[in-house]
C-alpha cells in the first residue's frame, strides 16, 4: 500500500483542481467531485494496475468507468495528475473545443476515457460488458465503476445488477457514492433508495460499506474488495461521503451539486486546501 499521508496530499491537490476548474469555467459540479476525491485518488495512485499510455481495449490492465459523469473535474484532475495527459490541460475545462467537456466524451480521444457518460444510469451496464469481455479474453484484471446514489433511481441499474449476479460477473467492483444528495435535494425527499445494502445483497452482490472520506478506510476497503473478487459474485462498495468534503461551506448540502464558486468563494475554498503538487497556470 502507498503512504497514507502522500495520498492525502494528492487528494488535497485534486480538490484544489476541482475548485479552480469549476470557478474558471463558471460552471460544473464541485459538490460530489470533492466528496469522491479520496476514493479516486486511492484507486488511481495505489489500487489499480493501469497504464497512462492508455489502450482503449484495456487488455491486461485494470480499467475504470465513471458513470456519474458530472463529477468530471475530479476525474480529469486524477487522470492528469497520474500521467494520462499534461496537467496544464485542466485549464481548458468546459472551454469550446476542449477535450475536457463538462461530461466525459470520447470524440476528442481524451486518454483514460472509454465511454461518454453524460446520461446517468448507464455506466454499470458498460462496466459489466467490459468485465465479461475480460473473461472471454482470459484477462484476469479487474473492472471498476463509480455511480451516484441518486443515479440508482434509473431502472437500468437494477437490470444490470440482476444480469451481473446471474452471469457470475465476479471481476467487477462497483462503488456507489452514497452521499444522500442529488441535484433537487436529499435522496429521501426525491425518491428514497430504501435499504440500499439489503437491496444490493438481495440482487446477489457481495456488499461492503465504507467511509469514503477516510483515506485509510478507503484504501483498506478497496483491497478487501479485490480479495473478494473471483468467487462467483460481483462486489459493490457502498461509500458514505459528504458532498463538498474539504470545503466547510460546501459540506452537508445539495446546493453545491451543480453550482460553481465565484471568485470570493473560490479563494475561501482554496485557503482550506493545501497545495501539494503545484497549481497549473491559467492564460487569458
Image (cartoon, rainbow, N blue to C red):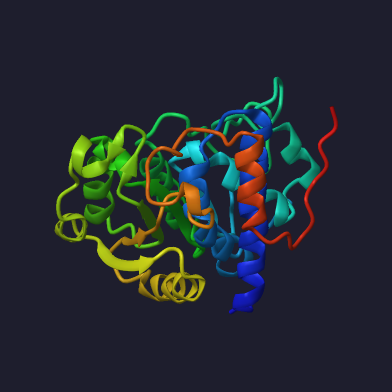
x, y percent for residue 103 = 54, 32
Compared with 150, 25 (above or below) is above
x, y percent for residue 157 = 28, 41
In this rendering, would 79 be left or right of 209? right
In this rendering, would 38 be left or right of 181? right
The quadrant of the picture occupied by the N terminus is bottom right
Q: Residue, x 68% and y 37% (percent of image)?
A: 110
Q: Is residue 69 visible?
A: yes
Compared with 18, 248 (above or below) is below
Residue 220, quarter of the rendered image: bottom left
Count of residue discs = 0
x, y percent for residue 276 = 74, 63
Q: Is residue 112 visible?
A: no
Q: Nearer the viewer, residue 139 or 157?
A: 157
Residue 135, quarter of the rendered image: bottom left
Q: Residue, x 69% and y 32% (percent of image)?
A: 24
x, y percent for residue 237 = 35, 62
Q: Residue, x 63% and y 79% (percent of image)?
A: 3
The quadrant of the picture occupied by the C terminus is top right
Q: Nearer the viewer, residue 273 or 83?
A: 273
Q: Nearer the viewer, residue 176 or 27?
A: 27
Q: Residue, x 63% and y 26% (percent of image)?
A: 107
Amino acid at each position: 500500500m502507498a503512504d497514507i499521508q502522500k495520498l492525502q496530499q494528492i487528494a488535497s491537490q485534486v480538490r484544489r483542481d476541482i475548485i479552480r476548474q469549476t470557478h474558471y469555467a463558471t460552471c460544473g459540479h464541485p459538490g460530489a467531485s470533492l466528496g469522491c476525491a479520496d476514493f479516486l485518488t486511492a484507486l488511481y495512485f495505489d489500487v489499480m494496475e493501469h497504464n497512462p499510455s492508455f489502450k482503449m481495449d484495456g487488455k491486461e490492465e485494470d480499467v475504470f468507468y465513471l458513470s456519474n459523469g458530472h463529477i468530471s473535474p475530479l476525474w480529469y484532475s486524477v487522470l492528469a495528475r497520474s500521467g494520462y495527459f499534461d496537467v496544464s490541460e485542466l485549464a481548458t475545462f468546459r472551454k469550446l473545443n476542449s477535450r475536457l467537456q463538462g461530461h466525459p466524451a470520447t470524440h476528442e480521444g481524451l486518454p483514460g476515457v472509454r465511454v461518454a457518460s453524460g446520461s446517468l444510469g448507464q455506466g454499470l451496464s458498460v462496466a459489466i460488458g467490459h468485465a465479461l469481455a475480460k473473461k472471454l479474453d482470459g484477462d484476469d484484471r479487474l473492472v471498476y465503476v463509480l455511480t451516484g446514489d441518486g443515479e440508482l433511481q434509473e431502472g437500468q441499474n437494477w437490470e444490470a445488477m440482476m444480469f451481473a449476479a446471474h452471469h457470475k460477473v465476479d471481476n467487477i467492483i462497483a462503488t456507489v457514492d452514497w452521499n444522500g444528495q442529488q441535484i433537487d435535494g436529499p435522496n429521501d425527499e426525491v425518491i428514497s433508495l430504501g435499504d440500499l445494502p439489503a437491496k444490493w445483497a438481495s440482487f446477489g452482490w457481495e456488499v461492503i460499506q465504507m467511509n469514503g472520506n477516510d483515506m485509510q478506510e478507503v484504501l483498506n476497503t478497496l483491497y478487501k474488495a479485490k480479495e473478494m473478487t473471483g468467487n462467483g459474485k460481483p462486489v459493490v462498495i457502498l461509500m458514505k461521503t459528504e458532498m463538498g468534503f474539504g470545503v466547510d461551506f460546501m459540506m452537508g448540502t445539495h446546493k453545491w451539486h451543480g453550482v460553481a464558486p465565484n471568485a470570493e468563494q473560490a479563494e475561501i475554498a482554496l485557503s482550506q486546501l493545501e497545495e501539494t503538487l503545484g497549481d497549473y497556470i491559467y492564460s487569458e
